Amino acid sequence: MLIEDLNQRSRTIFRQIVDSYILTGEPVGSRTLSQKLHDPLSPASVRNVMADLEDSGLIFSPHKSAGRIPTDIGLRLFVDGMLEMGNLSREERTTIRVQCRESGQNVEDLLTRATIMLSGLSRCASLVIAPKNDHPLKHMEFVYLSPGQALVVMVSEGDDVENRIITIPTGLTASALIKAGNYLNARLVGRTFTEAKHHIERELKNQQAELDSLTQSVVEQGLAVWAGNHATAAAHDRLIIRGQAKLLDNMDTIHDLERIRRLFSDLENKKDLIELLESAREAEGIRIFIGTENNLFSLSDSSVIASPYMDEKNNILGIIGVIGPTRLDYARIIPLVDYTAKVIGKIL
Protein backbone atom coordinates (compact mmCIF):
# COMPACT_ATOMS: atom_id res chain seq x y z
CA MET A 1 0.00 0.00 0.00
CA LEU A 2 1.09 3.58 -0.73
CA ILE A 3 0.31 6.62 1.39
CA GLU A 4 -1.58 8.00 -1.61
CA ASP A 5 -4.11 5.17 -1.19
CA LEU A 6 -5.33 6.76 2.05
CA ASN A 7 -7.72 9.72 2.02
CA GLN A 8 -6.97 12.75 4.15
CA ARG A 9 -9.16 11.64 7.06
CA SER A 10 -7.51 8.20 7.16
CA ARG A 11 -4.03 9.77 7.03
CA THR A 12 -4.83 12.11 9.90
CA ILE A 13 -6.17 9.36 12.16
CA PHE A 14 -3.36 6.97 11.19
CA ARG A 15 -0.75 9.62 12.02
CA GLN A 16 -2.38 10.19 15.42
CA ILE A 17 -2.24 6.46 16.16
CA VAL A 18 1.46 6.23 15.21
CA ASP A 19 2.41 9.42 17.07
CA SER A 20 0.62 8.18 20.20
CA TYR A 21 2.31 4.76 19.96
CA ILE A 22 5.80 6.28 19.56
CA LEU A 23 5.17 8.58 22.52
CA THR A 24 3.53 6.14 24.96
CA GLY A 25 3.77 2.63 23.55
CA GLU A 26 0.11 2.18 24.45
CA PRO A 27 -2.95 1.47 22.25
CA VAL A 28 -5.16 4.46 21.54
CA GLY A 29 -8.95 4.28 21.25
CA SER A 30 -11.51 6.07 19.13
CA ARG A 31 -12.77 8.35 21.92
CA THR A 32 -9.25 9.61 22.69
CA LEU A 33 -8.55 10.13 19.00
CA SER A 34 -11.77 12.05 18.41
CA GLN A 35 -10.73 14.51 21.12
CA LYS A 36 -7.27 15.06 19.56
CA LEU A 37 -8.46 15.82 16.04
CA HIS A 38 -8.57 19.46 14.91
CA ASP A 39 -11.70 18.82 12.86
CA PRO A 40 -14.56 17.48 15.03
CA LEU A 41 -15.29 13.82 14.37
CA SER A 42 -17.45 11.49 16.44
CA PRO A 43 -15.94 8.36 18.08
CA ALA A 44 -18.21 6.27 15.83
CA SER A 45 -16.77 7.89 12.70
CA VAL A 46 -13.24 7.40 14.03
CA ARG A 47 -14.01 3.71 14.67
CA ASN A 48 -15.12 3.31 11.05
CA VAL A 49 -11.83 4.76 9.80
CA MET A 50 -9.87 2.58 12.26
CA ALA A 51 -11.71 -0.50 10.96
CA ASP A 52 -10.62 0.36 7.40
CA LEU A 53 -7.02 0.88 8.54
CA GLU A 54 -7.10 -2.46 10.33
CA ASP A 55 -8.48 -4.20 7.24
CA SER A 56 -5.55 -2.69 5.31
CA GLY A 57 -3.08 -4.25 7.76
CA LEU A 58 -1.80 -0.90 9.06
CA ILE A 59 -3.04 -1.13 12.66
CA PHE A 60 -4.15 -3.87 15.05
CA SER A 61 -5.35 -4.45 18.59
CA PRO A 62 -2.61 -6.03 20.77
CA HIS A 63 -5.21 -7.32 23.24
CA LYS A 64 -8.96 -7.26 23.86
CA SER A 65 -9.56 -3.54 23.99
CA ALA A 66 -10.78 -0.74 21.78
CA GLY A 67 -7.27 0.61 21.37
CA ARG A 68 -5.06 0.14 18.33
CA ILE A 69 -1.33 0.39 17.58
CA PRO A 70 0.46 0.34 14.21
CA THR A 71 1.68 -2.90 12.66
CA ASP A 72 5.23 -3.19 11.30
CA ILE A 73 3.73 -2.64 7.85
CA GLY A 74 2.01 0.47 9.16
CA LEU A 75 5.23 1.79 10.67
CA ARG A 76 7.03 1.21 7.37
CA LEU A 77 4.33 3.16 5.52
CA PHE A 78 4.59 5.95 8.06
CA VAL A 79 8.41 6.13 7.92
CA ASP A 80 8.55 6.02 4.12
CA GLY A 81 5.62 8.31 3.36
CA MET A 82 4.62 10.48 6.31
CA LEU A 83 7.65 11.01 8.54
CA GLU A 84 8.61 14.64 9.07
CA MET A 85 12.30 14.59 9.84
CA GLY A 86 13.54 16.61 12.78
CA ASN A 87 16.62 18.82 12.78
CA LEU A 88 19.55 18.38 15.13
CA SER A 89 20.19 21.30 17.43
CA ARG A 90 23.49 23.18 17.29
CA GLU A 91 24.34 21.72 20.71
CA GLU A 92 23.76 18.15 19.51
CA ARG A 93 25.93 18.66 16.45
CA THR A 94 28.69 20.16 18.59
CA THR A 95 28.47 17.29 21.07
CA ILE A 96 28.81 14.70 18.30
CA ARG A 97 31.81 16.45 16.71
CA VAL A 98 33.62 17.07 19.99
CA GLN A 99 33.06 13.57 21.39
CA CYS A 100 34.30 11.95 18.21
CA ARG A 101 37.35 14.20 17.75
CA GLU A 102 38.53 13.71 21.33
CA SER A 103 39.43 10.13 20.42
CA GLY A 104 42.53 11.32 18.54
CA GLN A 105 43.78 9.07 15.75
CA ASN A 106 42.84 5.73 17.32
CA VAL A 107 40.05 4.19 15.22
CA GLU A 108 38.78 1.87 17.97
CA ASP A 109 38.62 4.73 20.48
CA LEU A 110 36.77 6.86 17.92
CA LEU A 111 34.15 4.20 17.24
CA THR A 112 33.75 3.34 20.93
CA ARG A 113 33.23 7.00 21.82
CA ALA A 114 30.82 7.43 18.92
CA THR A 115 28.66 4.46 19.98
CA ILE A 116 28.56 5.57 23.63
CA MET A 117 27.65 9.11 22.59
CA LEU A 118 25.00 7.93 20.10
CA SER A 119 23.49 5.61 22.70
CA GLY A 120 23.19 8.51 25.15
CA LEU A 121 21.59 10.88 22.64
CA SER A 122 19.18 8.29 21.21
CA ARG A 123 18.45 6.52 24.53
CA CYS A 124 18.91 3.22 22.68
CA ALA A 125 21.67 0.68 22.27
CA SER A 126 24.22 1.70 19.66
CA LEU A 127 26.36 -0.50 17.44
CA VAL A 128 29.09 -0.07 14.88
CA ILE A 129 31.06 -2.25 12.49
CA ALA A 130 34.69 -1.18 12.40
CA PRO A 131 36.67 -1.06 9.15
CA LYS A 132 37.99 -4.43 8.07
CA ASN A 133 41.38 -5.21 9.53
CA ASP A 134 42.70 -7.56 6.86
CA HIS A 135 46.15 -8.39 8.24
CA PRO A 136 48.25 -10.85 6.28
CA LEU A 137 49.21 -14.25 7.61
CA LYS A 138 52.98 -14.61 8.05
CA HIS A 139 53.29 -18.36 8.17
CA MET A 140 51.23 -21.55 7.95
CA GLU A 141 52.51 -25.01 8.81
CA PHE A 142 51.03 -28.51 8.83
CA VAL A 143 52.28 -30.91 11.53
CA TYR A 144 51.58 -34.66 11.26
CA LEU A 145 49.88 -35.98 14.40
CA SER A 146 48.58 -39.45 13.57
CA PRO A 147 47.05 -41.32 10.62
CA GLY A 148 44.19 -39.12 9.40
CA GLN A 149 45.04 -36.12 11.60
CA ALA A 150 47.30 -33.07 11.34
CA LEU A 151 47.76 -29.81 13.21
CA VAL A 152 47.51 -26.49 11.33
CA VAL A 153 49.67 -23.74 12.87
CA MET A 154 48.91 -20.19 11.70
CA VAL A 155 51.08 -17.21 12.61
CA SER A 156 49.70 -13.76 11.77
CA GLU A 157 51.25 -10.29 11.89
CA GLY A 158 52.02 -9.43 15.49
CA ASP A 159 53.07 -13.07 16.02
CA ASP A 160 49.59 -14.21 17.10
CA VAL A 161 49.46 -18.01 16.85
CA GLU A 162 46.34 -20.11 16.16
CA ASN A 163 46.25 -23.94 16.12
CA ARG A 164 43.58 -26.15 14.56
CA ILE A 165 43.34 -29.92 14.11
CA ILE A 166 42.19 -31.09 10.68
CA THR A 167 41.38 -34.43 9.09
CA ILE A 168 43.78 -35.51 6.34
CA PRO A 169 43.54 -38.33 3.79
CA THR A 170 44.75 -41.67 5.11
CA GLY A 171 48.18 -42.47 3.81
CA LEU A 172 49.26 -38.84 3.40
CA THR A 173 52.95 -38.53 4.23
CA ALA A 174 54.70 -35.92 6.37
CA SER A 175 56.58 -34.75 3.27
CA ALA A 176 53.25 -34.03 1.53
CA LEU A 177 52.21 -31.88 4.50
CA ILE A 178 55.49 -29.96 4.23
CA LYS A 179 54.86 -29.47 0.51
CA ALA A 180 51.35 -28.13 1.22
CA GLY A 181 52.75 -25.71 3.81
CA ASN A 182 55.48 -24.51 1.45
CA TYR A 183 52.93 -23.97 -1.31
CA LEU A 184 50.72 -21.79 0.91
CA ASN A 185 53.57 -19.81 2.46
CA ALA A 186 54.98 -18.93 -0.97
CA ARG A 187 51.66 -17.26 -1.76
CA LEU A 188 51.01 -15.57 1.59
CA VAL A 189 53.93 -13.15 1.66
CA GLY A 190 52.83 -9.55 1.09
CA ARG A 191 49.16 -10.48 0.59
CA THR A 192 46.13 -9.87 2.76
CA PHE A 193 43.79 -12.75 3.53
CA THR A 194 41.38 -11.77 0.75
CA GLU A 195 44.15 -11.36 -1.84
CA ALA A 196 45.89 -14.63 -0.96
CA LYS A 197 42.64 -16.60 -0.85
CA HIS A 198 41.56 -15.40 -4.29
CA HIS A 199 45.02 -16.07 -5.76
CA ILE A 200 45.23 -19.63 -4.38
CA GLU A 201 41.66 -20.51 -5.32
CA ARG A 202 42.28 -19.26 -8.86
CA GLU A 203 45.43 -21.39 -9.19
CA LEU A 204 43.70 -24.50 -7.91
CA LYS A 205 40.69 -23.94 -10.17
CA ASN A 206 42.89 -23.44 -13.24
CA GLN A 207 45.09 -26.39 -12.21
CA GLN A 208 48.19 -24.23 -12.27
CA ALA A 209 49.39 -25.62 -8.94
CA GLU A 210 51.88 -28.47 -9.19
CA LEU A 211 50.19 -30.53 -6.49
CA ASP A 212 48.90 -34.07 -6.41
CA SER A 213 45.28 -34.57 -5.42
CA LEU A 214 46.04 -35.55 -1.80
CA THR A 215 48.30 -32.54 -1.19
CA GLN A 216 45.79 -30.25 -2.87
CA SER A 217 43.06 -31.44 -0.48
CA VAL A 218 45.29 -30.45 2.47
CA VAL A 219 45.89 -27.02 0.93
CA GLU A 220 42.13 -26.55 0.51
CA GLN A 221 41.50 -27.58 4.11
CA GLY A 222 44.19 -25.22 5.35
CA LEU A 223 42.60 -22.42 3.34
CA ALA A 224 39.18 -23.27 4.80
CA VAL A 225 40.55 -23.23 8.36
CA TRP A 226 42.22 -19.87 7.72
CA ALA A 227 39.00 -18.48 6.25
CA GLY A 228 36.96 -19.69 9.22
CA ASN A 229 39.46 -18.29 11.69
CA HIS A 230 39.51 -14.97 9.82
CA ALA A 231 35.70 -14.74 9.77
CA THR A 232 35.38 -15.61 13.47
CA ALA A 233 37.96 -13.03 14.48
CA ALA A 234 36.30 -10.43 12.28
CA ALA A 235 32.89 -11.07 13.79
CA HIS A 236 34.12 -10.57 17.34
CA ASP A 237 36.65 -7.80 16.74
CA ARG A 238 34.73 -5.61 14.31
CA LEU A 239 31.39 -5.30 16.10
CA ILE A 240 31.09 -2.82 18.97
CA ILE A 241 27.83 -2.61 20.97
CA ARG A 242 27.24 -0.05 23.71
CA GLY A 243 24.29 1.11 25.79
CA GLN A 244 22.33 -2.14 26.17
CA ALA A 245 21.17 -0.85 29.58
CA LYS A 246 19.28 1.93 27.76
CA LEU A 247 16.95 -0.75 26.42
CA LEU A 248 15.74 -1.37 29.97
CA ASP A 249 14.45 2.19 30.32
CA ASN A 250 10.68 2.79 30.14
CA MET A 251 9.96 -0.92 30.63
CA ASP A 252 6.41 -1.07 31.98
CA THR A 253 5.05 -4.56 31.39
CA ILE A 254 6.01 -8.23 31.47
CA HIS A 255 5.71 -8.13 27.68
CA ASP A 256 8.44 -5.46 27.60
CA LEU A 257 10.69 -7.65 29.77
CA GLU A 258 10.24 -10.64 27.47
CA ARG A 259 10.90 -8.48 24.42
CA ILE A 260 14.15 -7.17 25.91
CA ARG A 261 15.22 -10.69 26.92
CA ARG A 262 14.79 -11.82 23.33
CA LEU A 263 16.59 -8.75 22.01
CA PHE A 264 19.57 -9.36 24.32
CA SER A 265 19.67 -12.92 23.01
CA ASP A 266 19.65 -11.61 19.42
CA LEU A 267 22.50 -9.23 20.20
CA GLU A 268 24.61 -12.15 21.37
CA ASN A 269 24.48 -13.60 17.87
CA LYS A 270 27.17 -11.38 16.41
CA LYS A 271 27.42 -13.20 13.09
CA ASP A 272 23.75 -12.61 12.20
CA LEU A 273 23.89 -9.05 13.50
CA ILE A 274 26.91 -8.26 11.34
CA GLU A 275 25.16 -9.74 8.29
CA LEU A 276 22.17 -7.49 8.98
CA LEU A 277 24.30 -4.37 9.33
CA GLU A 278 26.43 -5.26 6.31
CA SER A 279 23.27 -5.17 4.20
CA ALA A 280 23.20 -1.43 4.94
CA ARG A 281 26.18 -1.14 2.58
CA GLU A 282 23.76 -1.58 -0.30
CA ALA A 283 21.93 1.62 0.66
CA GLU A 284 23.08 5.06 -0.41
CA GLY A 285 22.19 6.49 2.99
CA ILE A 286 20.18 5.52 6.05
CA ARG A 287 18.78 1.97 6.17
CA ILE A 288 15.86 1.18 8.49
CA PHE A 289 14.82 -2.33 9.56
CA ILE A 290 11.45 -2.50 11.33
CA GLY A 291 10.40 -5.48 13.44
CA THR A 292 9.45 -8.54 11.43
CA GLU A 293 11.04 -7.17 8.25
CA ASN A 294 14.17 -8.95 9.46
CA ASN A 295 14.13 -12.48 10.88
CA LEU A 296 16.80 -11.67 13.47
CA PHE A 297 14.52 -9.32 15.39
CA SER A 298 11.14 -10.76 14.40
CA LEU A 299 10.34 -11.86 17.97
CA SER A 300 11.66 -8.88 19.90
CA ASP A 301 9.66 -6.05 18.26
CA SER A 302 12.86 -4.14 17.55
CA SER A 303 14.00 -1.70 14.89
CA VAL A 304 17.46 -0.87 13.60
CA ILE A 305 18.50 2.45 12.05
CA ALA A 306 21.91 2.18 10.38
CA SER A 307 24.08 4.23 8.06
CA PRO A 308 27.39 3.51 6.34
CA TYR A 309 30.31 5.86 7.02
CA MET A 310 32.68 6.59 4.15
CA ASP A 311 36.10 8.04 3.38
CA GLU A 312 36.72 11.05 1.14
CA LYS A 313 36.47 8.85 -1.97
CA ASN A 314 33.04 7.56 -0.87
CA ASN A 315 34.45 4.11 -0.11
CA ILE A 316 32.32 2.51 2.62
CA LEU A 317 34.46 1.80 5.69
CA GLY A 318 31.83 0.49 8.11
CA ILE A 319 28.32 0.94 9.47
CA ILE A 320 27.00 2.67 12.58
CA GLY A 321 23.47 2.58 13.96
CA VAL A 322 21.10 2.18 16.88
CA ILE A 323 18.69 -0.53 17.93
CA GLY A 324 15.60 -0.17 20.08
CA PRO A 325 11.87 -0.93 20.22
CA THR A 326 9.81 -0.47 17.06
CA ARG A 327 8.35 2.70 18.60
CA LEU A 328 11.64 4.51 18.11
CA ASP A 329 11.52 8.26 17.68
CA TYR A 330 12.43 7.90 14.00
CA ALA A 331 12.21 11.63 13.25
CA ARG A 332 14.88 12.36 15.86
CA ILE A 333 17.13 9.28 15.61
CA ILE A 334 17.51 9.10 11.82
CA PRO A 335 19.30 12.49 11.59
CA LEU A 336 21.37 11.57 14.69
CA VAL A 337 22.69 8.42 13.04
CA ASP A 338 23.17 10.14 9.69
CA TYR A 339 25.16 13.05 11.12
CA THR A 340 27.30 10.78 13.33
CA ALA A 341 28.18 8.63 10.30
CA LYS A 342 29.25 11.74 8.37
CA VAL A 343 31.43 12.98 11.26
CA ILE A 344 33.14 9.59 11.62
CA GLY A 345 33.78 9.49 7.88
CA LYS A 346 35.41 12.93 7.95
CA ILE A 347 37.67 12.02 10.86
CA LEU A 348 38.75 8.75 9.31
Image: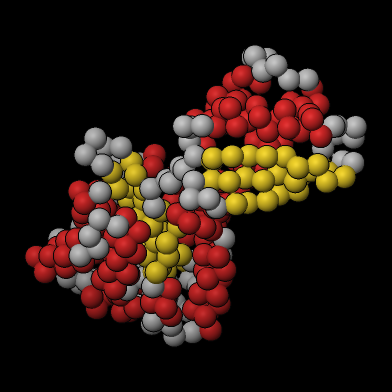
- Point 45% across, 54% down: residue: 238
| Vertical side of 280 occupied by 14: above or below | below
Image position, residue 19 (x, y; %): 29, 69
**Rendering quarter of residue 85:** bottom left
Image position, residue 180 (x, y; %): 71, 30
Image position, residue 304 (x, y; %): 40, 59
Image position, residue 49 (x, y; %): 36, 63
| Vertical side of 175 occupied by 305: above or below | below
| Vertical side of 226 occupied by 250: above or below | below
Is residue 26 among the parts visible in the rendering?
no
Determine whether, in the image, residue 104 is placed left or right of residue 161: left
Of the pair 141 and 327, the residue shown nearer to us: 141
**Rendering quarter of residue 128:** bottom left
- Point 59% across, 39% down: residue: 139
Label count reads: 0
| Vertical side of 234 occupied by 226: above or below | above
Is residue 245 among the parts visible in the rendering?
yes
Of the pair 39 and 285, the residue shown nearer to us: 285
- Point 20% across, 48% down: residue: 346
**Rendering quarter of residue 45:** bottom left
Determine whether, in the image, residue 337 is placed left or right of residue 216: left
